[in-house]
Amino acid sequence: NDINYYNKMSAILPKGLLQLNGNFSQLNSPLLIIVYLLGVLICLISLILNWEPYYKRTYTPLISMIGFFLPLLIRNGENIIWMLLLGLIVAFIGSIFYVLAIGKVYR
């Protein structure tokens, strides 16, 4: 019945509850882009270092690499927060699998 509540919810719901100020459909922060590219580079280095000996070979850094690539592949019009959260969750899950896979080798 409150018209102010209705107006506020009408403004929030089309963009979602998690939103940024400014343009929420582009990744404009150079520091955040560098952090994600650094994550991709670290995953690539760990994949290369564990590739040569066959008993240590694992593909699990690729899961984390996909997680770091996801926010960099945002199309126009998508909400950036959901891609950032999804990318961080995938990178975290990939790093857990990587630690478990490498930990079994060195026991």
Image (tube, helix red, strand yellow):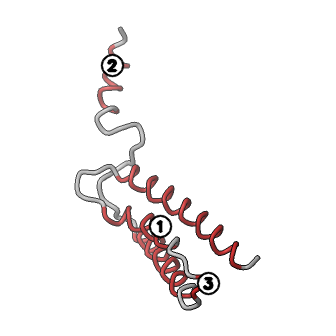
- Residue bearing the label numbered 2: 6
Marker disc for residue 55 = 3
Q: Of the residues tagged 1 and 2, which is closer to the observer?
A: 1
Provide the secondary structure element on which disc 3 rests.
Answer: helix
What distance separates the C-alpha of mark 1 from that of mark 2? 42 Å
Image quadrant where residue 72 sits: bottom left
Residue located at (30% from left, 26% from top): 10
Q: Quadrant of the N terminus?
A: top left
**Image side of residue 68 versus residue 42, left or right:** left
Q: Of the residues tagged 3 and 2, which is closer to the observer?
A: 3
Dot 3 amino acid type: Tyr
Q: Are marks 1 and 2 in contact (CB under 8 Å)?
A: no
Q: Of the residues tagged 3 and 1, which is closer to the observer?
A: 3
Q: Earlier in the sequence, mark 3 or mark 2?
A: 2
Expressed as whole percent of the image width and height from the top left, the position of residue 60 reads: 52, 71
- Residue bearing the label numbered 1: 63
What distance separates the C-alpha of mark 3 from that of mark 2? 61 Å
Expressed as whole percent of the image width and height from the top left, the position of residue 43 reads: 51, 77
